[in-house]
Image (tube, helix red, strand yellow):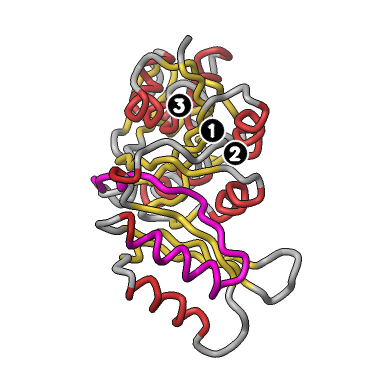
Amino acid sequence: MNLKVAIQGIKGSNHHQVAKEFFGEEIELVECLSFDNLIAQLLSGTADKAVMAIENSIAGSIIPNYNLVYHNKIHIIGEHYLNIHHHLMVKKGNVLADVQEVRTHPMALLQCKEFLSQYPEIKLVEDVDTAETAKQIKEKNLTNVAAIAPRVAADLYDLDIIAENIQTIKNNATRFIILKRQNKELPKSEINKASVRFITDHKRGSLATVLNVMSDCNLSLTKIQSLPVIETPWKYAFFVDVTFDKYENFAKAKSLLDIMAEDFLVLGEYKNALVP
């Protein structure tokens, strides 16, 4: 039986590409048109694992996804980086002059802002997924609509690419996290990265003290993101990614931070992926 992998989007999306690169071709996709639904499919057991975008090198963090992982007690078991290439595509035989509307995911619109600004007459419409619009163009025979999507979507849905690599910054990468209901996935000898969450009190220097403990334990900070604690106004939780050479160093830091920080939780322990 093939591994069931939940993705945000459909076949031809960047999430689909990451699922193939991380797990291989022999997988069964569970297509989800929202991150909330993706988590629901994982929690219900419909999906064995899931792929979720968490940050982009241009647009920054996808803030709500941090809380989705935390509040649903989902575990991060891996990560994967994907270079993002956005292409403008239309129904076979159509050209740019035919386009009255461009539909795609809001993140793709943001990342292609400079190219799109050349065509103020074209209406920009946010959609749930990059590949979804490509699919709709094919199925509904849309002649005045263009999609911004990965090249694989043009191949899958038989569309013409009329403008290649239209993203503003060509070196554009997204970090995806791999999710599972349980955290046990790798032997400790292979683990060299972790994601944690904690809250600090309002005393001056509290966050610096926590970060110093990480440094003293030879952990390298690769990401820190603060989010408000919804239940307590003006209180903030910190989501932190760290890398380390020895798991023992992280284990020592865990024991100290569990005492020092409020509501300390390990969201995942996994293998550090190569940044493209």
Q: Can see residue 92?
A: no
Which label number is shown at residue 8? 1
Quadrant assignment for the C terminus: top left
The mark nearer the N terminus, 2 or 1, is 1
Image coordinates for residue 265, horizontal then vertical, percent: 56, 58
Between marks 3 and 1 in the image, the one whose residue lies nearer the viewer: 1
**What segment carries the magenta color?**
249-276
- Above or below, 99 against 76 in this view is above
Q: Which residue is mark 2?
A: 35
Distance between the Cα atoms at labels 2 and 1? 6 Å
Q: Is 271 contained in the magenta span?
A: yes
Q: Amino acid at mark 1?
A: Gln
Q: Amino acid at mark 2?
A: Phe
Which label number is shown at residue 107? none
The 10 Å Cα crowd at callout 3, few under 14, some 14 to 19, many 20 or more, is few
Q: Residue furthest top?
A: 1
Image coordinates for residue 226, horizontal then vertical, percent: 54, 67
Q: Residue at x 44, y 51 (%)?
A: 55
Mark 3: secondary structure? helix
Task: Out of 201 and 139, give the one closest to the viewer.
Answer: 201
Count of numbered circles in the view: 3
Task: Out of 269 and 246, give the one closest to the viewer.
Answer: 246
Q: Which residue is mark 3?
A: 98
The 10 Å Cα crowd at callout 1, few under 14, some 14 to 19, many 20 or more, is many
Distance between the Cα atoms at labels 3 and 2? 33 Å
Image coordinates for residue 254, horizontal then vertical, percent: 46, 63
Mark 2: secondary structure? helix
Between marks 3 and 2 in the image, the one whose residue lies nearer the viewer: 2
Q: Is 112 on the left-hand or right-hand side of 258?
A: left
